[in-house]
Amino acid sequence: MVDDDLTVSDVVRRYLEQAGCEVQLAADGADGLAAIAAARPDLVVLDLMMPGIDGLEVCRRIRRQLPDLPVVMLTALGEEADRVLGLEVGADDYVTKPFSPRELVLRIRSVLRRTAAHTARPTVPAKLTDSTLIVDTARRIATRDGAPLSLTAREIDLLIFFMHHPGRAWSRSDLLDKVWGWQFGDQSTVTVHVRRLREKIETDPADPHRIRTVWGVGYRYDPLDEKAGQ
């Protein structure tokens, strides 16, 4: 957990330890990055507003070095634009201060469950292929035109889900349930992740040919390759 508010960190640490987690605290961005590099944790809880290296920059650096590491961002800012910004730089989830430590524990459990679930996916093929877009689902590696894609844990979750269920329209609430495992949540989370994914897999993200918007419903994945997902 990376947060300069030591009181908040201590309270959250105690709740997480009661939930069976091992917790390491860092008081600023620089210490947090060093601890993450050394410990390679299962998940990072990251405050947005910190002196020195702020949470957004810490998240950017995590994504460059460890793109599959789940990040839950804490923010005292209530505006939607600020929450969306955290998601755009790669956070998997966010919790707005003041928050309930119990809610944070539930959010962390949800993210970790989704991450752990990918170690055993008997119904998903080992490889999903759509033209030059290839996903190794076991290794959770995606390439396009032979070049590796830098995808966050949630982005590759979403891509695998779309490629495994082509041709069907899914609402944002459907995707929150199927991909995030949330029964409730801010649907702008889905919108941000779809936009980020389009930027990485579409030739022209402004005119997407794979992830299409279905007005009044949500999104549909249309493979370029008719045999995609087979």
Image: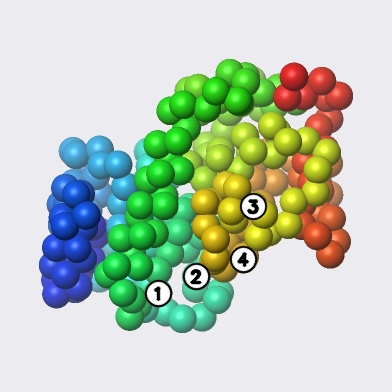
Mark 2 or mark 4, which is nearer the start of the sequence?
2
Label 1 vs label 2: CA separation? 8 Å
**Is the residue marked by circle 4 packed among few (<14), some (14-19), or many (20+) residues within 10 Å?**
some
Label 4 SS: helix
Residue 13 makes an appearance in the image: no
On screen, 218 above or below 100? Answer: above
Q: Position of residue 143 (x, y in %)?
A: 61, 26
Mark 4 or mark 1, which is nearer the start of the sequence?
1
Label 3 SS: helix
Residue type (three-letter) at the residue carrying disc 2: Arg
**Is the residue marked by circle 1 packed among few (<14), some (14-19), or many (20+) residues within 10 Å?**
some
Which labelled disc corresponds to residue 188?
4
Which labelled disc corresponds to residue 175?
3
Label 2 vs label 3: CA separation? 19 Å
Give left or right: position of 163 versus 136: right
Q: Position of residue 25 (x, y in %)?
A: 15, 57
Residue type (three-letter) at the residue carrying disc 3: Leu
Mark 4 or mark 3, which is nearer the start of the sequence?
3
Please name the residue shown 81% across and 43% down the image.
168
Please name the residue shown 78% across and 35% down the image.
166
Please name the residue shown 35% across and 52% down the image.
109
Mark 3 and mark 1 in contact? Answer it, CB < 8 Å.
no
**Is the residue marked by circle 3 packed among few (<14), some (14-19), or many (20+) residues within 10 Å?**
many
Mark 4 and mark 2 in contact? Answer it, CB < 8 Å.
yes
On screen, 52 above or below 139? Answer: below
Which labelled disc corresponds to residue 83?
2
Mark 3 or mark 2, which is nearer the start of the sequence?
2
Give left or right: position of 106 versus 20: right
Mark 1 or mark 3, which is nearer the start of the sequence?
1
Q: Quadrant of residue 100?
A: bottom left
Mark 1 and mark 2 in contact? Answer it, CB < 8 Å.
yes
| Residue on which disc 1 sits | 96
